[in-house]
Image (tube, rainbow, N blue to C red):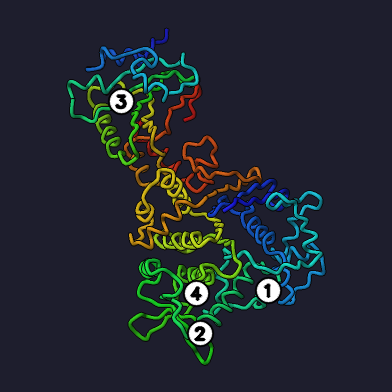
Amino acid sequence: MAAKTKKKPTFKEVVKSTSGLETYWRAGLKALRAEDKPHIVPEDPRKLVGSVDIDAAYLATDPHGNRWDFAIGYQHTNRDEEVIYWVELHTGSSAEIKVVIRKAQWFHNWFKGAGKKLATFEKEILWVSSGSPRLSPSAPQTKQMAVAGLKQVGGSLRIPNRKNS
Amino acid sequence: MKTKTLKIRNLGQINEADLSFGDLTVLVGPQATGKSIAVQMLKLMVDAGKIQEEMGRHGIDWEGDLWDFTDAYFGEGMHMMWNPGQSEIVWDGRRVDVEQIAKRKRRNKDENLFFIPAQRVLALRDGWPRPFTDYSPGGPFAVREFSEKLRVLVEKEFSGESLFPQPKRLKKELREMLEKHVFSKFSLKVDKVHSQKRLVLGESNGDGSLPYMVWSAGQREFVPLLLGFYWLMPPTKVSRRGRIEWVVLEELEMGLHPRAISVVLMMVFELVTRGYRVVLSTHSSQVLDAMWALKHLAENNAKPEALLEVFGAPNTGGMRDLATKMMKKTRKVHYFDRERGTTRDISDLDPSSEEEGESGWGGLSEFSARANEAVANAVSNH
């Protein structure tokens, strides 16, 4: 008889077992503030598995840190596991890119510690920059973001059912 | 300035091109997609009578034949781009019968468009502009005419004078930028060897001079371009030359470092603010970066200093005035799509557009975008 392969825990299970996030799991987009929700546009809202307000979760323990905003799980039709969209909703000008990059650095450090298990999911790290024009693709700032693993999307994040890459 | 339009159907590589021209228009797209044909067609629409006159004056006789006229104007072998019964040109809303242009001499001999061709480096041979008839008969009219204009300019308007620096033609700030980014410590002047005139680069503080053959590739590209700008900027109180309304400048970036490209773009802005309607074709993402910056600075009512900062231009009253005027001008960007043989208006230059032609800025930022994407993916999933 073939040995049973151990099933990988779901996004929800890992969130509930992550130090600091235990009580922050919310279904759908409920972790987002009402004014932030219109910036997330899923092709099929039923495939939004859940969301976490990272910023709120670590406010008490890391009040001066450049805390990341949200994590959103989505079940794409061409993936076995959920993909996590780590989203920073920053409506300031693109001049604030340094702040967003510092947030990304906070986030990468967090992945090495408390968020280690969540780092194993396929992910997209995105700056939804409503209110400011997108940076030119050839701009050095865009490259700084790329090196921080960050991609800038426009005013809203569209999540398709089929993930391209 | 009122927008003008040019529609081209079934001509060479072009299946369907719909171009609208603002005060400053930029054409982008891969090689051999029809950009050059489109701007030469624009010249023909604007200056048919003058072209006929110039060709006749230099001994070209096409005998009313469309194919011969096409070969003489666009260059040898170009008659093949005509698709009888299919090719169609509509200029500013009116269908134009190009066959009639070839057949009948136009009475109006005004010249309204000055064309600075991509092959401008050919205009100087051994450091002196070549006359029209110095080219082989199959050479495109735009190249031969540009060369001839430079010859007349240098012979009639610069007898014994220094061509650079030249206080009567360019703003002091633009001259200083050119000194810094193109000419270094050199000046451009007319020299004589055995009675033969030639352009040389001379050391500002000495007698030494460098003949054409030892100029850098960038200097060889730039000097004909500079002379073209001089032609458009007469040393008198008038801001434009004759009846010239249009300027076509192909591939301004050729052979130039990005800092030099910035200066040339400021010189283009100078032309636009003088009231010329300028059309650029380019393979430089810097030119589109400039158009993108102009758009967003204008839309956000930015101060003129912000535009000057983009170009590393000095913050003086004259330059602020230039920047202020430039931000009020209308802009257009068109993409020539090789696969479809069509054009697309990508003036919004939206990097998040779902249309790849627009988000990749006609292919000019495609490589940077792919590199950024690959690095961001690698870092986020490391």
Q: Residue furthest top?
A: A1
Can the viewer see residue B55 in this picture? yes
> Label 1: which residue?
B136
Amino acid residing under circle 4: Thr
Q: Earlier in the sequence, mark 1 or mark 4?
A: 1
Q: Determine crowd level at label 4: few under 14, some 14-19, many 20+ residues with C-alpha closer than 10 A.
A: few
Q: CA distance from mark 2 to mark 1?
A: 28 Å
Marks 3, 1: nearer the viewer: 3
Question: What residue is shown at x 50% (from left), y 62% (from top)?
Answer: B274
> Do the residues at discs 2 and 1 belong to one chain?
yes
Instruction: Specify few, some or many for label 2: CA neighbours under 10 Å numbering under 14, 14-19, or 20 or more.
Output: few
**Residue B236: which disc?**
4
Q: Chain of mark 3?
A: A
Residue type for callout 1: Ser
Tell me residue B99's x, y (percent).
80, 59
- What is the spatial separation of the Cα atoms under label 3 and label 2, in whole angstroms? 69 Å
Q: Label 1 lies in what chain?
A: B
